[in-house]
Amino acid sequence: MDPNVNLQRRERQRDIEKLRKELLKQEKQQKKQQEKEQKKQQEKERKKHQNKERSALLTKERCKSYYENNKQKKMAAEAEASNLQLNGGASTSTSSFTMSSGLGLTLPNYSLECLRKRIQEEIDEHCTKNFVKHFT
């Protein structure tokens, strides 16, 4: 055989081997890149899930504190109503008073039942406004 033909054959084989190695290298790099992206996506999903859990816990806490505050306001209103009954219906000579619970409700002389009803309506209205403001 011609030595030139042998040389050409060896060169082709070397070139083929180089291409094969390069392809393997590229495949490895692609695989690494895919794994990296997959890990990134999993981390993103994990953080998203954690944020959802945190958000749910915060909402639960807000609702709990809202209802506790509402309960305390109702108790304060009942205490004010019972104080009014003890004081003969009014706490000042002008026959009106302002509740200390922060509602700023001025009430003239009423019967105790009417007074309780009015206080409860004001508390419900106030709490509903705050609930809507904080949770929407």
Image: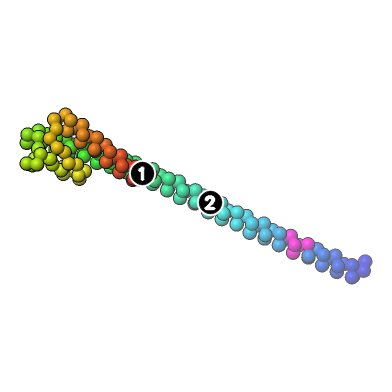
Residue 5 lies, with reference to residue 96, above or below; the image says below
Residue drawn where x is 43% and y is 45% of the image: 52
Front residue of 93/12: it is 93
Task: Give the magenta range.
Answer: 16-20
Residue drawn where x is 16% and y is 38% of the image: 107
The kind of residue tagged 1 is: Phe
Give percent across and percent down for residue 130: 30, 43
Residue drawn where x is 60% and y is 57% of the image: 33
Which label lies toward us, 1 or 2?
1
The kind of residue tagged 2 is: Gln
Give percent across and percent down for residue 44: 49, 51
Check the image and name the residue furthest to the right.
Answer: 1
C-alpha distance separating marks 1 and 2: 31 Å
Q: Which mark is residue 135?
A: 1
Q: Of helix, strand and loop, which one carries label 2?
A: helix
Going by the image, does 14 lie left or right of 133?
right
Is residue 119 visible from the viewing direction of this image? yes
Is residue 67 visible from the viewing direction of this image? no
Going by the image, does 69 lie left or right of 135?
left
User: Which residue is tagged 2?
Assistant: 41
